[in-house]
Image (spheres, rainbow, N blue to C red):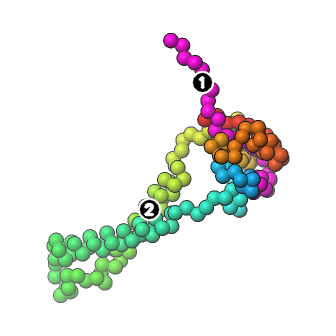
């Protein structure tokens, strides 16, 4: 039985720009035009690019705070359980619940849990690791880590239309606009 050839699904349009300023200006115009599913790729950090694309603050800070609180409670609780409940020892006539001595280890578990929460939530919210992305299919995208600046608008965007979006990106003085397949 023969299988019908299926065309790959369209991921979006990729536009290449000549400079960081051209990319920043284009990103501002793309966001102003109402596109919400756009991303930019640059070999260097560009101040204001995330804001130009409309990226918002993620929820990592509250998660790190919760991780720190859990770490403090876990550290202090472990010390309390071991020193007061499970195996109480009378050392130097101090009380079993010597809270002053419990502070430094509890602080360390606070830092430990906060750091792990920050790292893991950053990876999860950024969708990492991501060994494949459709932009890797573009021939010129290999220059993105060296000297090229790219802007992609995804086909999943509600305002996306191949012809209109392609003309819009070309009107932003893009060097080249190519279609990306999944």
Quarter of the figure with the C terminus: top right
Rate crowding at label 2 as few (under 14), some (14 to 19) or many (20 or more) other CA atoms within 10 Å. many
Residue 152 seen in the current view: no
- Any part of residue 48 in sight: yes
Give the SS element for disc 2.
helix
- Where 60 falls versus 35 (above or below)? below
In magenta segment, residue 14: yes
x and y, in percent, of residue 43 in the image: 69, 51
Q: Is 171 on the left or on the right of 12, as rendered?
A: right
User: Closest to the observer: 123 or 170?
Assistant: 170
Expressed as whole percent of the image width and height from the top left, the position of residue 24 reads 75, 56
The answer to which of marks 2 and 1 sits earlier in the sequence is: 1
Residue situated in front as seen by the camera: 140 or 24: 24
Q: Are marks 2 and 1 in contact (CB under 8 Å)?
A: no
Q: Is 25 displayed left or right of 62 in the figure?
A: right
110 on left or right of 2? left
Q: Which residues are magenta?
A: 1-29
In the depicted view, which residue is nearer to us: 79 or 94? 79
Most extreme residue toward the bottom is 93
The answer to if 15 sits in the magenta stretch is: yes
Q: Residue at x 64, y 35 (%)?
A: 10
Task: Say which residue appears at 64% left-offset and 49% top-offset.
Answer: 37
Label 2 or label 1, whichever lies nearer to me, is 1
Query: Does residue 124 lie above or below 83 as drawn?
Result: above
Residue at 20% from the left image edge and 85% from the top image edge: 95
Q: Which residue is mark 2?
A: 117
- Classify residue 181 by image quadrant: top right
Q: Which residue is mark 1?
A: 6
């Amino acid at each position: 039985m023969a299988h019908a050839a299926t065309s790959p699904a369209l991921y979006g349009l990729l536009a290449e720009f000549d400079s960081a300023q051209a990319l920043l200006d284009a990103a501002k115009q793309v966001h102003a035009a109402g596109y919400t599913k756009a991303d930019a790729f640059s070999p260097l950090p560009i101040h204001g690019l995330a804001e130009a694309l409309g990226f918002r603050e993620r929820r990592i800070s509250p998660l790190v705070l919760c991780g720190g609180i859990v770490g403090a409670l876990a550290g202090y609780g472990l010390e309390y359980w071991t020193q007061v409940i499970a195996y109480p020892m009378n050392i130097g006539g101090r009380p079993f619940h010597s809270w002053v001595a419990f502070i430094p280890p509890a602080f360390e578990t606070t830092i430990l849990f906060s750091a792990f929460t920050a790292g893991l939530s950053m990876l999860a919210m950024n969708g990492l690791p991501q060994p494949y992305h459709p932009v890797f299919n573009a021939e010129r995208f290999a220059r993105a880590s060296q000297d090229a600046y790219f802007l992609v608008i995804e086909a999943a965007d509600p305002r996306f239309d191949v012809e209109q979006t392609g003309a819009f990106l070309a009107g932003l003085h893009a060097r080249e606009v190519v279609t990306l397949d999944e």
